[in-house]
């Protein structure tokens, strides 16, 4: 009998704490598959950030460090600069990466740190119970925008890939989603490329994964995917925002 | 052979760190510690090390945290306002049991304060190095030579006890030049770090460097265990210089640059027939309580001299359990007490020259 489906080796054999229908599970799996396929688990160090994904340190089988809120790219910089043979990735949510950690994100990117950043954008603070995130959409109702996000009062959402693509230090950034099999396959390809770039010493790579938070959006997992397609993808268009090596080849 | 060289305090701290096996430095500019970072920027590329200018003090301490978590000796330096920003990272490092050295070349505060020497971060360093129940090792040099010696000691202690160590210097020590003997290179102690997150290479279970414990009982247990370690440190690592204390009736106490001034005042008091002595804590945490307890047996009174509004003075009161009066004399942010002013205070306490 042949095995047709199994858990990636880089993924720990434990039950996660994620809510039903949450897309973190899919994204964890894609990261673990990339680590397996590239054969780098033994030299990989993951940086868990603060938010729902903080306990990812229990879910990956590689060495893990838990970072203060927003500081994962700085912690990753410390690991990569002092142990360049390690493959270093951060796994961060939108509040972590695009609000409190904006400086660390922008400056690790502009320095061209040779690290891989997995950015999960679900437009809300999940762990603390559904407050407005830097990526919450205009009009989006959250615990702290009970009348909807008023952009004249609370400001506009941050488009991370667009912002980072202007920086010379960035090797690669792509926005993907995991709402369908087809898109999951695309996300997998992007995540693997972001790791491959690091192995090849190409520099800062970030993959933004547009995700759902059924619990805090107050929707069923299926409806949440629908909401993502109807509302998030128009504001956060999928695609490659920068691929320095590919651009060089074209020239 | 080790040679005697003339060095500025800030530069001596940097070179001493390199010779203590620290080849990775993460910093952010701030007066009056700038020469330290500049020295690192010049030296590190020559020895294949890291000098990285971070985007903030917050980022710099977190880079140190990353290096420390990966089992590497790393250092950052700053001055008071910048140190306040590093406290988040320091607290996480305490919670994750990570060793590293943080240099604080103190300046006046609060707020932007001033750029002149101060000792007003004593409470910050010894009482509240970030949120939560935690301590860091705090070492207070009072000469450029001692800056050199204590950096190596700080790294060794930090690695041994798996906790951050702070060198609490000040703008006066950072800027002054004195002759120093540097230790030879390549003799730094290497301490095994089997807990480090640096890749398991298929040889062991994965290491997790973490400070989160959502089960209250688990957190309680871990913090209590850490405090058992702190108790051991308080028992074994406290260090002070006792100067003319044996028959002293009036004990002056001061640390860092202020201790040099106090020492001169003690000598002058002796000339006047006042039996004065000096206790100079070298470790501020752990605080050298035993030296004070011993001195309290014979001393009539204590005088704490600080470049602050009075911070260490409270630890002196606790150490002597208010059995003897403890007086305070201090100036803040760049107003450096003179030996004559300290002598005047000693005279006052002694009730005039005997």
Image (cartoon, coloured by chain):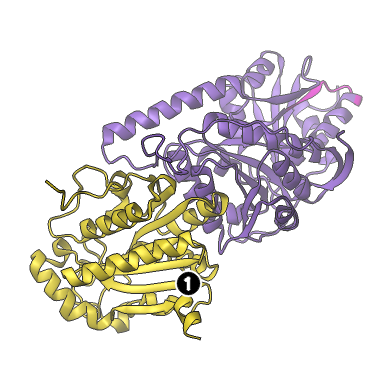
Chain colours: A yellow, B purple
Q: Where does residue B326 sit, x and y in percent of width and height?
A: 65, 28
Which region is colored magenta?
B271-279
In the foreground, B41 or B60: B41
Q: Residue at x 27, y 36 (%)?
A: B216
Q: Residue furthest bottom?
A: A251
Q: Position of residue A151 (x, y in %)?
A: 29, 82
Q: Is residue B30 above or below residue B70?
A: below
- Chain letter of the residue carrying label 1: A
Give the quarter of the image for residue A150.
Answer: bottom left
B248 sits to left or right of A49: right
- Name the residue: 50% across, 80% down: A248
Q: State the residue at coordinates (42%, 49%).
A: A44
Q: Is residue A65 magenta?
A: no
Circle 1 Cα neighbour tier, 10 Å, few/some/many (<14 / 14–19 / ≥20): many
Question: Where does the image place residue B110, in percent across and percent down from the top left?
Answer: 59, 55
Q: Measured from the top left, where is residue B149 in percent x and y?
A: 74, 34
Q: Nearer the viewer, residue B22 or B170?
A: B22
The quadrant of the image that shows the N terminus of chain B is top right
Residue placed under numbered mark 1 in the picture:
A171
Out of B78 and A161, give the one closest to the viewer: A161
Q: Quadrant of residue A218?
A: bottom left
* Residue A184 figure quarter: bottom left
Q: Identify whether A7 is placed above or below B320.
A: below
């Amino acid at each position: 009998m042949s095995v047709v489906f199994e858990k990636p080796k880089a993924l720990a054999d434990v039950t996660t704490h994620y809510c039903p229908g949450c897309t973190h599970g899919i994204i964890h799996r894609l990261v673990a598959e990339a680590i397996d396929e590239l054969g780098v688990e033994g030299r990989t160090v993951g940086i868990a950030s603060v938010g729902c994904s903080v306990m990812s340190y229990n879910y990956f089988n590689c060495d893990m460090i838990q970072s203060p809120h927003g500081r994962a790219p700085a912690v990753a910089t410390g690991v990569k600069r002092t142990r360049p043979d390690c493959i270093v990735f951060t796994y961060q949510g939108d509040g972590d990466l695009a609000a409190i950690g904006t400086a660390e994100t922008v400056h690790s990117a502009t320095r061209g740190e040779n690290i891989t950043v997995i950015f999960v954008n679900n437009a809300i603070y999940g762990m603390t119970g559904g407050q407005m995130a830097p990526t919450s959409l205009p009009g989006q109702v959250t615990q702290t925008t009970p009348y909807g996000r008023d952009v004249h009062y609370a400001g506009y959402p941050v488009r991370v890939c667009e912002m980072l693509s202007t920086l010379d230090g960035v090797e690669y950034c792509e926005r993907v989603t995991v709402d369908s099999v087809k898109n999951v396959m695309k996300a997998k390809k992007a995540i693997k490329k972001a790791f491959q770039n690091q192995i090849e010493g190409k520099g800062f790579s970030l993959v933004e994964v547009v995700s759902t938070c059924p619990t805090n959006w107050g929707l069923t997992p299926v409806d949440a995917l629908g909401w993502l397609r109807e509302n998030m993808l128009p504001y956060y268009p999928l695609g490659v925002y920068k691929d320095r090596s590919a651009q060089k080849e074209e020239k | 052979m080790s040679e005697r060289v003339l060095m500025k305090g800030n530069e001596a701290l940097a070179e001493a760190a390199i010779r203590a096996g620290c080849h990775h430095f993460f910093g952010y500019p701030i007066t009056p510690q700038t020469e330290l970072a500049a020295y690192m920027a010049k030296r590190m590329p020559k020895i294949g090390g890291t000098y990285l200018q971070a985007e903030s003090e917050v980022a710099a301490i977190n880079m140190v945290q990353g290096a420390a978590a990966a089992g590497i000796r790393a250092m950052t330096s700053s001055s008071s306002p910048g140190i306040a920003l590093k406290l988040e990272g320091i607290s996480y490092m305490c919670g994750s049991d990570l060793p590293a050295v943080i240099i604080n070349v103190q300046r006046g505060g609060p707020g932007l304060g001033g750029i002149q020497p101060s000792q007003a971060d004593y409470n910050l360093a010894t009482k509240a190095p970030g949120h939560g129940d935690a301590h860091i090792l705090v070492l207070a040099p009072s000469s450029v030579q001692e800056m050199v010696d204590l950096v190596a000691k700080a790294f060794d202690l930090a690695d041994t006890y798996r906790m951050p160590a702070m060198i609490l210097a000040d703008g006066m020590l950072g800027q002054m030049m004195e002759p120093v003997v540097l230790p030879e290179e390549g003799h730094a102690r290497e301490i095994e770090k089997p807990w480090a997150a640096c890749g398991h290479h298929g040889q062991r279970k994965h290491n997790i460097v973490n400070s989160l414990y959502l089960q209250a009982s688990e957190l309680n247990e871990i913090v209590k265990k850490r405090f058992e370690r702190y108790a051991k440190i308080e028992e074994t690592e406290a260090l002070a210089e006792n100067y003319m204390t044996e028959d002293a009736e009036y004990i002056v106490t001061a640390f860092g640059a202020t201790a040099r001034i106090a020492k001169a005042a003690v000598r002058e008091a002796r000339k006047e027939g006042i039996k004065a002595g000096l206790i100079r804590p070298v470790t501020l945490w752990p605080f050298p309580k035993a030296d004070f307890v011993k001195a309290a047996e014979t001393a009539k009174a204590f005088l704490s001299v600080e470049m602050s509004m009075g911070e260490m003075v409270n630890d002196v009161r606790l150490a002597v359990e208010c059995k003897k009066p403890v007086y305070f004399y201090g100036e803040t942010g760049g107003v450096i007490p003179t030996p004559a002013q300290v002598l005047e205070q000693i005279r006052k306490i002694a009730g005039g020259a005997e």
